[in-house]
Image (tube, rainbow, N blue to C red):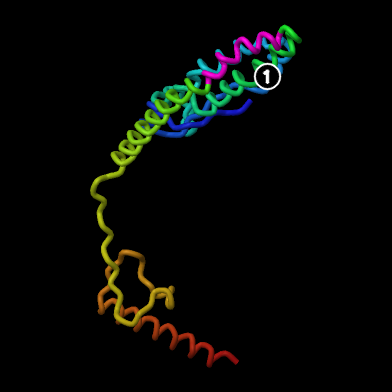
Amino acid sequence: MAEQMRQGFCRECNKYTLVKRRGVNHILHLLLSIFTLSLWVVVWVFLTLFHVGGWRCQACGSDQIKDTGEMLSLRGWIIIVFMAGFVLPLMIVMAGGDSGVSSMESITGILVWVPVLSIPVLIVMAVQHRNRKQERAQSNRAEVPQSMPAAPDTVYRPGDSPQAQPESAPPAGMIVSEETYERAETDQDAAAEFRRRMQQRDP
């Protein structure tokens, strides 16, 4: 069974986060519709339309989730249109034979309105999705501190390259004075002189 994932507000985390739940097993419902000669299609549509709740936060596992946009997703409407325009007529023809073909001629006019009526629903869904996206963006911006302390600029002596001399480069954000550089160079020169003398003493 596929999992559905979307963004929702977790009361435990107190922020919008990724939530998930088990989705509707459309393959199983399609097989049941075939075996029951389209009688199961009504149950399939009902479960697709009213499959709500059951969301869990992927970060903390809490089920205290709200604002997930429980309105049917675009994928759900595509499945319903597919069932109404293809699966249901096919089931009627298979179950009724010649009488099923004649029945299809009488309900074709009704099925034509299914995609037409779906257009305003999809428009409403798009508007609601945009509004939820804006609310989540505002919530995420509110979590970021308005004023972040600026890191002090690192002062290097002109001509020095921290990349070229990583062993003598000061830590990021550290202010280094000219006197500190002179002491560091003196220490390095003394260490180099000591190593040179030790090498000369070795046979």
- Vertical comparison of 100 with 167: above or below: above
Residue at 44% x, 32% y is 7
Give the quarter of the image for residue 85. Answer: top right
The C terminus: image quadrant: bottom right
- Vertical comparison of 163 with 192: above or below: above
Residue 144 located left or right of residue 93: left
Task: Compare residues 72 and 67 and report the one nearer the observer.
Answer: 72
Task: Compare residues 181 and 83 and report the one nearer the observer.
Answer: 83
Task: Compare residues 180 and 67 and report the one nearer the observer.
Answer: 67
Q: Which residue does the numbered mark 1 point to in the structure image?
A: 30
Residue 83 located left or right of residue 164: right
- Vertical comparison of 82 with 16: above or below: above
Q: Does residue 105 show up magenta in the picture?
A: yes
The N terminus: image quadrant: top right
Give the quarter of the image for residue 64. Answer: top left
Q: Position of residue 75 (x, y in %)?
A: 54, 28
SS assignment at label 1: helix
Which residues are the magenta region? 100-114
